[in-house]
Amino acid sequence: MAIRILADEVVSQIAAGEVIERPASVVKELIENAIDAGASAIMIRTEEAGKRIIEIIDNGCGIQSDELEKAVMRHATSKLTNAEDLFHIHTLGFRGEALAAAGSVSRMRITTCTAEGNNGYSITVDGGKITGIHQTGTKQGTIVQVTDLFYNVPARLKFLKSDVTERNQIEILISRYALAYPNIRWQSTHDGKPGIRTTGNADYREVLTAIYGVDIAKKLIEIDLKEEGISVFGFISPVALTRSNRREMNFFVNGRWIQDVQLNSAIIRAYQSLIMVGRYPIAALFISMDPEEVDVNVHPSKAEVRFRSPDKVFGIVHRAVRRSLIFQSPVPEIHSNAQWPGWHAPANPQSNDNELTTVVDNPAEGIPVAFWRTELPQNQIPPNNSIPAGSSSAILQPQSNFQTAPINPGFPILRWIGQIGGTYVIAEGPDGLYLIDQHAAHERILFEKLMGQVDSRIASQSLLEPAIVQVSAWQTSLLEENMDILTRLGFRIELFGPATYRILSIPEIFTKGNPAAAVRSIVEDFEEDETPLQSEIEKRIAGRICKSMAVKAGQPLSEEEQRGLIRDLENCQSPRTCPHGRPTMIHLSIHLLERQFGRKGTI
Ligand code: ADP
Ligand code: MG
């Protein structure tokens, strides 16, 4: 094929592809323009996840009528004059590409008026071609409407994710800017539903509350450190508040949100040994330095930067975070694991913040101590008969001491003895002592009950007083996306306000527990782009809810409740582990006790 110069249209579509990948990229560019224009209020409205309409209204300086045409041309900018300027950038934009790119892949209308202009003007662009400029009445500021995004590049449309994901991306993005610019009044709506709202009174905590909800916002620790011309200000989570992904670690360099692997690891290192491996903090860090110290021109979407002295920057960030953590956060108590001589307790990376759990292995015998009824002599195995439905009442409800035979043949018949540390229920079995982790066991019980009912219909009960749950703006669409599953699992939840939901009813089996916390726990640990099979999502959600609703370690239980827990565990299909795979109980065999007491052999 002969070499040819590409037509202008093709060139601009290729260029647009770098800047505008999805609806959220349009929102990003338009928001940046509004911020650069000095707006003190920015409104964002989208329809159909931005594919149908993206509208950004600002009260910034506006564009002069004689410059409107230029504004939508490629490489046209008011923010840069020569290459030298690239190292003194004080604005978010500088490439002069965004409006041209957005206009080339949509139908775009810009309506604008400057402070001096007596009249407003509007320009319309269709697939990159200017189709008209009109005089019109409007207030000072700019309205950019982008409709039918990618109508002329259908291939792009096919690459977009579900509306929920795309909308989530947009809302995450707006949240980031709202946080970086708390002096701007932000307001977003998606298909008429309210998203984030802030007052613009420069109060970071207020924006944090709008994003994360009040519970988390008030826990975040403020950090502030200035060293060698670099300042690090922001908010980090205390060690007890972590996430399973890095998504909520956000960095802003001179007001620009950026992604940086090394900054991520500087923070993770600062938390090292304070939080579990595989868990990540929440962080919003604003790093400021002389613009000459950062090269912002390394990426078309301007989401990456290069530091002139990277080590210096990472060092300061690391110190700022570490110091605040050590000074302001209670260092978690270290519990000795050596309960018995000769026993060791490996650290359990799965275990959760609010639990005191230890998996005990028995190196002396080379097998995990949890042992099961398969080792019982045949004649001790109870008949595998069934239990009348409903007889395995939820624990925490008094129940009869009548012993029903367990349906699970792989499980020892246990006699209740007591509870230690408000955490472990002690029971005697056919061959020794059993320690049951009440939280893990209850989690398993609730999980099986819930999943057992799901195909018929889960018995649901109305809450006397609806529980209000505030999720972070970033999590709203995640919750919406999984609403059908929650309904199937017996929850009735409705939108109550911006990022606020009202729980009207919950599954009957959850007699105690905090419904709001359970709902929040669902959205907290989901990765945004994860798309497990539908059936897996349901199980995972059920698992999370049960974990949240289960009795906690350290919670004293009545004798009936403890007996009930044992009975209910016996009736589980898989009583050995909690839904997350941790053991529900450990077994100290008679044999082992004898050896420990020096009756038989040595250890
Ligand atoms: P850049 O932001 O890199 O300069 P854009 O294509 O995004 O490039 O915008 C081109 C120019 O249009 C900007 O330099 C600015 O002068 C003007 N402009 C764009 N959006 C706005 C706005 N919301 N308010 C005022 N001026 C704007
Ligand atoms: Mg721009």
Image (cartoon, helix red, strand yellow):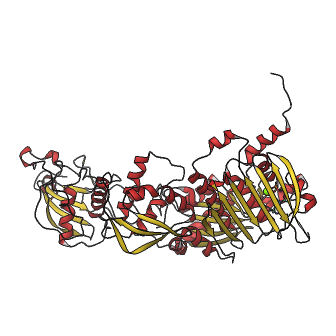
Image quarter for residue 173? Answer: bottom right
Q: Can residue 132 be seen at all in this image of the molecule?
A: yes
- Where's ligand 1: which quadrant? bottom right
- Residue 333, x across and y down, in percent: 40, 70
Is 280 displayed left or right of 463 in the figure? right
Q: Is residue 491 above or below residue 328?
A: above
Q: Is residue 546 above or below residue 148?
A: below
Is 208 displayed left or right of 56 in the figure? left
Count of numbered tags: 0
Which one is nearer the viewer's eye here, 169 or 435? Answer: 169
Is 111 displayed left or right of 554 in the figure? right
- Residue 586, x across and y down, in percent: 23, 56
Is 259 displayed left or right of 68 in the figure? left
Q: Is residue 281 above or below residue 182?
A: above
Q: Which residue lies most toward the top here?
A: 1
Quarter of the figure with the N terminus: top right
Q: Which residue lies most toward the right here?
A: 66
Q: Residue at x 40, y 47 (%)?
A: 535
- Residue 192, x across and y down, in percent: 62, 63
